[in-house]
Amino acid sequence: MITTKYFFLLISAAGFAVIILYHWFSTKVTLEDKQLTVHFAEGNNAQLMHNSPNYWQTGTAKVEDSTTYRNYDEKFVIIYNRVPKTGSTSFVNLTYDLCKKNAFHVLHINITANMHVLSLPNQLKFVRNITAWDSMKPAFYHGHMAFLDFAKFGMPSKPLYINLIRQPLDRLVSYYYFLRYGDDYRPYLVRHRAGDTMTFDECVARQKPDCDPTNMWLQIPFFCGHHAECWNPGSSWALEQAKRNLVNEYFLVGLTEEMDEFIELLELSLPRLYRGAISHFQKSNKSHLRKTKSKVEPAAETVAKIKESAVWQMENELYEFARDQFHFVQKKLHTPGKNVMQDFMYEKIKPNPNGAAKN
């Protein structure tokens, strides 16, 4: 017979073992649930990163660190300051389709009289509201609004800006016929120039205001921002500022004619919001929303005349700048010469995180 003393000692030891096993198992499950994959090695070997961009690694492999980093995903604020007639309706409707499935909010920015620039008081209210409205996060805001620099207002964090850009003459021609015939998105809505059957070629030949090259001055100010000079057609300063903002302030700027590739990059980079986006986009009817009806391609002589204007040349320079940047980002997805996704690693980690601390 086991004495009472030894019986209690046996029970205590068993309880202690259960506690140890419970903590070990809980930690293992938590790490697996959070997809934390950490491999440390000495010498020339490296700590390999998980191949999904949504997974975070830490040098100490602490569960609380993983939770902290993953919480960034829950605080995402994306602003899509959509340029008119660049395919934005198709992209926004895709995002609305994904918001319930991927558990995030989509909000439309509706400015009085479709103004593209906010008043100074509203600029401050806007950046404060978006920054502090935690119950809406993760959030995707969209609207026809010029770029607004959150850092100017002393905000502790900045949103991720994204956008699409289109060849400037294509955008102008599309808008010209859209005002006369509408599109297949709301076919029964009467547009401002309904009944006017003048072609774009005829408009250019007669030098009418609807086809004036200055009407192309829109993508530059949308990327340039809320400065007065941004809205001065033909401003070299505005063009350079738009370029700077595009590379420094925008997370990703895609091309209207390469929207599939734009969505694919978003899914790879921001799976918290865009998981399943490319498959849904290709299988649904979202890829052909809002096609302008009765659009007539301009004649070669019309195109040549438009391209003589300084506004077209500047807008086209911004478009080509954005195109080169987008293709550069695409190219860097894969290892040179191989169809293998790029990865990165940490190596030569000192002191060894798995080793005991030395005095």
Image (tube, rainbow, N blue to C red):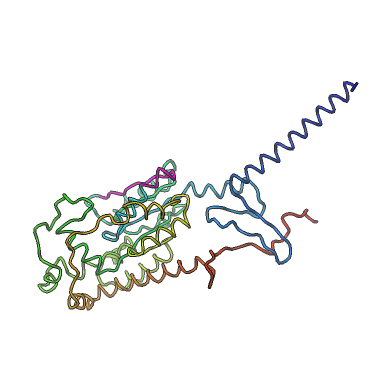
In the image, which residues are magenta? 97-111
Task: Out of 105 and 235, give the one closest to the viewer.
Answer: 105
| Number of numbered discs on residues | 0
**Image quadrant where residue 226 sits:** bottom left
Q: Nearer the viewer, residue 213 or 240?
A: 213
Which quarter of the figure is the C terminus placed in? Answer: bottom right
Relative to 57, residue 240 above or below? below
Q: Quadrant of the N terminus?
A: top right
Q: Residue at x 59, y 56 (%)?
A: 50
- Left/right placement of residue 199 relative to residue 151 reads left
> Residue at left 38%, top 46%?
129
Q: Residue 220 placed where, x, y %?
A: 31, 66
Quadrant of residue 314 within the rendered picture:
bottom left
State whether residue 9 is above or below residue 254. above
Q: Is 140 above or below relative to 326? A: above
Residue 342 point in image, percent of width and height: 54, 65
64 to 154, vertically: above or below: above
Residue 171 falls in image quadrant: bottom left
Residue drawn at x 73%, y 65% as measured from the top left = 43
Verify whether residue 284 appears in magenta.
no
x, y percent for residue 234: 26, 72
The residue nearer to you, when weighing 26 against 346, is 26
Q: Does the segment drawn in magenta span residue 109? A: yes
Extreme residue in the front direction: 283
Q: Position of residue 277 (x, y in %)?
A: 41, 53
Q: Is residue 323 left or right of residue 359?
A: left
In the picture, measured across the screen, residue 114 lies left or right of residue 358, that is left
Q: Residue at x 25, y 76 (%)?
A: 310
